[in-house]
Amino acid sequence: MTPPDETAWVVRAQCGDRDALEQLLRRIQPPLHGYVSRIVGPTHADDVAQEALMAVARKLAWLAEPLVFRAWVFRIASRAAFSHLRRTKRRAEDPLDGELLDAAEAPLPLPGDARLHELLDSSALSPASRAVLLLHFREEMPLAEVAAVLEIPLGTVKSRLAYGLKTLRREFGSA
């Protein structure tokens, strides 16, 4: 959910305040770029993030509920990132999508652990699972909001989360 002060900037930008729009784009750019970079890779992140920010600027007037600005921006970025992956034919499918976690597997590192950030960037993760993990753990979105951002059913989010965590546990166990 969007912080209250950010909501005020959204409303001002929707009313034509260019300074408010610039402030919004400056605030959202770093987390958005980090998210996109981890989905499409650092080589293409600048282009995809810029495409997403341009879409945000173009479509902001049509955002009906300013409180959901942050989730709306990540939805636009997700669409741009996955569209880019489709265009470049680099999209990897989740071969084990739907598999449940084994409770006996190794625990994940804590959020403050530097290895967690390294593992989230792991090439072993599919882009679909990486998107779910980043939105849920790094952007601290509830699973229902992740489902809304990615426009997929909640069950699919849970499945991709399970697959991603299983992959990370396997990587963490061997690290």
Image: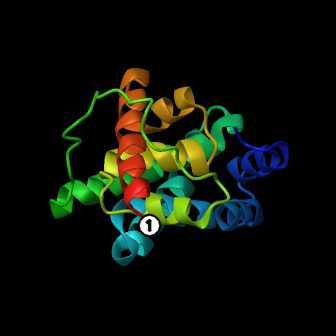
In the rendered view of the protein, which quadrant contains the N terminus?
top right
Q: Is residue 61 visible?
A: no
To which quarter of the image does residue 28 belong?
A: bottom right
Q: Secondary structure at mark 1?
A: helix
Nearer to us in this view, 118 or 53: 118
Residue at point 45% right, 60% down?
A: 119
| Residue 120: % across, % down | 46, 58
| Residue 27: % across, % down | 70, 63
Residue at point 36% right, 69% down?
A: 41
Q: Left of 107 or right of it: where is 151?
A: left
Nearer to us in this view, 4 or 118: 118
Q: Residue furthest bottom?
A: 43
To which quarter of the image does residue 174 belong?
A: bottom left
Q: Amino acid at mark 1?
A: Ser
| Residue 150: % across, % down | 42, 38
In the rendered view of the protein, which quadrant contains the C terminus?
bottom left
Number of numbered discs on residues: 1
Q: Which residue is mark 1?
A: 37
Residue at point 60% right, 61% down?
A: 31
Q: Residue furthest left?
A: 89
| Residue 146: % across, % down | 51, 35
Nearer to us in this view, 113 or 52: 113
Q: Residue furthest front?
A: 104
Q: Left of 115 or right of it: where is 151?
A: left
Q: Left of 71 or right of it: where is 76?
A: left
To which quarter of the image does residue 37 belong?
A: bottom left
Residue at point 48% right, 45% down?
A: 133
